[in-house]
Structure formats: C-alpha cells, structure tokens
Amino acid sequence: MTQDERRDFLIGRLLAERPDARRTDLPRDTGERKKLLRALVNVRAPAPIGEDFLAAEDEYLRRETAAKGVTTLAELSPIEPGIYLWQGDITALAADAIVNAANSGMTGCYVPGHNCIDNCIHTFAGVRLRLECARLMAEQGHPEPTGTAKITPGYNLPCRYVIHTVGPIVTGDVTERDERLLAGCYRSCLELAAEHGLHSVAFCCISTGVFRFPKDRAARIAVDTVRRYRKADMEVIFNVHSRENYDIYRALLG
C-alpha cells in the first residue's frame, strides 16, 4: 500500500465503526484527509480493533514521523550539566521517555484535532496508547490523582515510553498546594523513569495550557524540582513549543 492507500484504509475502518458516519464523503485534499483521520482517532473510544488495522496504522504513523523528521539527544547540547532546553515537536523526539500532560481520565483528549500535548501524543502514538491507558485505569478503578504518574510504551512515537502525569488546574490565584502538586508531577515522573532504568526524559510545560498555571512560576518549579531530584545519570530535556516559554526557561537555566 502507498501512504495514501493506508490513510484511506484507516479512515474507512474507523468510519465503519460509526453507523452515523458511514456515508461520509472523503475530502479530495490530502491535508483534509489527514485531519479526518486524526479526528476519527481522537474521538474513538478505547475498544479492541483488528490486527490488520494496527499493522497499517503502525506503518502509516512511522512514515509520517519519518517525513517530519526525528530529533535525537545527540543533536542537542546541554544548557547545564544533564539538562537541555529544546523548542520543537515533542512527538518527534527520540528520548527514552517523553512526558504527557494528561487529564485525570488518563485516556487522552477526545476533542477532534485539538492541539494540546495530550491529543498530539495520542494521535502520533496510535490507538494502542489509549487502549493501554484504559487498561491501566480499569485496574486502578479511580481517576488519576494530581501529581502522580504512570508509564506506557511509546508505540509509534520515536520515544520508548510515555510518562503520563496530571498537573494541577488553577482556578484563581496560584496556591501553595498548586505549587506542591506541580512539583509532585516532575518528581513523580523522574522517580518513575529511574525505576524503569531510563536515562533521558523530555518534559513538556505541565499545566500551563488549559490548566492555566502561570508559565513563569511553572517553569521555576520545573527547573528547581528537576535540579533537586534528577539522578546523576539521567538527562532531562525541557521541551517548549513557543518562543515565550523558551525565553522563560532560558533565563532560569545555565
């Protein structure tokens, strides 16, 4: 199959699961077809699916990631010993683990095409990530507490693992409890990475998006916590998306 044929096959299988959408006409434009596939993956509940779908999705996502380019740790330079600052796409970073800013349900963002880190990671990992997260949550039997973390395989991402953590949601002024919980996210991720023998972890800017934690205070907590709890043999990458966040971290590091 070509990449276009794989995409159409995946779209067709996902539409077939939705009786209300089986008559959907596929858009002619390749970009719009990519958006449709992403939307269908985003809204899909965690349910088993055939091995033929998974094989096609694996190949499709690996080729999509290769096309956008993968960044390795060897291509980056530390800003201080064991700590890096990188502005780029965390789903294209080949670290041992990347950190996902999850919600308490832990099975991803269900908003079609939403640009949050949770949505992006689940999109490019593939449907097996949501299935694994749902399995972990079913075993646990309750929502994930704020400040803790869980680990899953990275599936079709270039990282080996994804560490999922739930940051605090700020509803007014930032409280000391909010700050403790955010620090707990970074500490829990580092401890979980160490338990699994990982040597490189990339953090996104936890809680600074829709969870409304002020970016400068969140960055200071992130840097302070990583400096305090990072193991000597572990390399940490602070991954930022915007120039604003890059400048905030750059002022704190090095």
Image (tube, grey):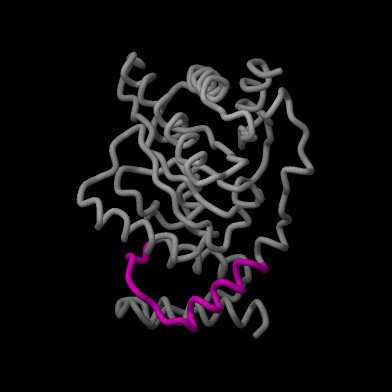
**What secondary structure prevails in the magenta region?**
helix
Residue 96 on image: x %, y %: 60, 48
Horizontal side, residue 33 vs residue 129: left or right: right
Q: Is residue 77 above or below residue 40?
A: above
253 or 25: nearer the viewer = 253
Residue 116, visible in the rendered structure: no
What x and y, as percent, mark residue 50?
42, 82
Q: Nearer the viewer, residue 210 or 24?
A: 210
Magenta-colored stretch includes residue 47: yes
The residue closer to the viewer here, 130 or 197, is 197
Per the rendered image, the range of residues in magenta is: 43-63
Residue at x 60% of width, y 27% of height: 245
The answer to whether residue 205 shows anywhere in this view is: yes
Looking at the rendered image, the quarter that the C terminus falls into is top right
Number of numbered tags placed on the structure image: 0
Q: Residue at x 32, y 65 (%)?
A: 45
Would you place residue 71 above or below residue 239 in this image?
below
Residue drawn at x 66%, y 28% as measured from the top left:
83
